[in-house]
Amino acid sequence: MIYFEMYPGDYLKDTTRLSLTDHGVYFKLMLAYYSEEQALPESLAELYVIAGAITTGEKAAVKKVAERYFPLAEDGLRHSKRCDEQIATAQARIADGQGRREDRKIAEAERQARTRARRTMLFEDLRNVGVVPSGMATMAELKALHVTHVTGDEGVTLDQLSRVTSHGESRVTWGVNTGVNTGNQTPDPTSSTPDTSQHAQGSQSGVTDAGRACLLMRKAGCHSTNPSHPDLLAALAEGVTPETLGHTVAEGLARSPPITNPFAWAIRTARNRHAAGAAPTNTTNPGGPNANPQLGSAEHVAEQRRLHEQREAAGGLGRSGSDVIDVEFEPVHH
């Protein structure tokens, strides 16, 4: 113990018959008791050493005080009821304080882990739409960017953050669980002009082509995107535009049943079409998103006319031995 409580009135009442030397012995033995937090030894010789008794009178005072105030107990040690009570109270108080300190440490560690998990979620969502904040951005700045570029609603952002635990057990993005196919879900209608002050370099507007492609694909209904995916980067390097990827996603999700993995399917389809020089399916045809997709009118007609003239020049139409045009014409709606 580093301190003990002493009540002068009680002490004086209990020590009225002690001499000045006796008081000194009492204090020396009591201080040893509290400092070691254990009872005194039985041996008087050891008590002489503890009290610093040298003369015969001092040793007699040690024997008198020890027998009166520190009697022997069944465990073979000299106990003081008052000292034992104060030591027990102090030990309980110390243990309680240590428990509270440990609780505070655990709570602080959990808070820091939860904050890291939430920052990771915000950074991931923002990168998925092409926004790359500074690594030194505060939580308030990240929340503001998330509202502006991802959810469009502060309440939605805060709800998503509240579901993120320190272990990442509940990870919600764009209103749906990460990794769940969202092809049949309604795309997020919110959109806004990106804040170029926080964006990565890579295009004149401050948004990378990969980020813009992911944003357009999300707006088309593909909620699981990755601007760092090697297939996406390869498609863009080959000349596939972000707009083409967005249209291709819309085409895949308009099918019945919709494509189960629109992100990978759109990239693969757009790359194949680009390599073959084909135009993407026009998904803005009359009849709404559930109507049968039609081929783009101008490009499709021009291509079929070119093939027709090429075949006619080679063998002629309707003549014996002429080639048969095997392309499929689909009705064009205006």
Image (spheres, helix red, strand yellow):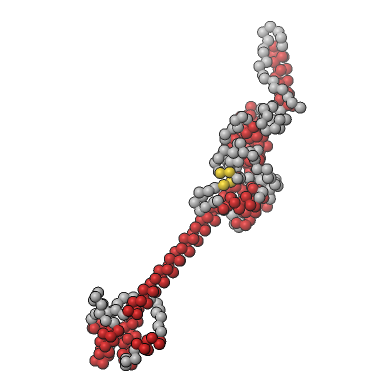
* Residue sitting at x 61%, y 48%: 126
Residue furthest out toward the right: 334
Task: Name the spot of residue 28 as percent of width and height, x first.
Answer: 33, 84
Query: Farthest top residue?
Result: 320
Question: For the point 52% across and 52% down, which residue is it?
Answer: 165
- Tell how many labels: 0
Q: Image check: 147 left or right of 103?
A: right
Relative image position of residue 239 (x, y in whole percent): 65, 35
Nearest to the observer: residue 111 or residue 97? 97
Please give left or right for residue 262 compared with residue 63 in the image.
right
Q: Nearer the viewer, residue 172 or 128?
A: 172
Q: Residue at x 40, y 77 (%)?
A: 2
Task: Examine the image and state in which quarter residue 258 appears.
Answer: top right
Where 282 falls versus 173 (above or below)? above
- Residue 274, relative to residue 218: is it above or below? above
**Residue 77 image point, x, y percent:** 26, 77
Q: Position of residue 221 (x, y in %)?
A: 63, 38
Between 199 and 118, the one nearer to me in the picture = 118
The quarter of the picture where the C terminus appears is top right
- The quarter holding residue 14 reads bottom left
Q: Residue at x 67, y 13 (%)?
A: 324
The quadrant of the picture occupied by the N terminus is bottom left
Q: Is residue 104 visible?
A: yes
Viewer-side residue, 297 vs 37: 37
**Is residue 48 something that shows in the picture?**
no
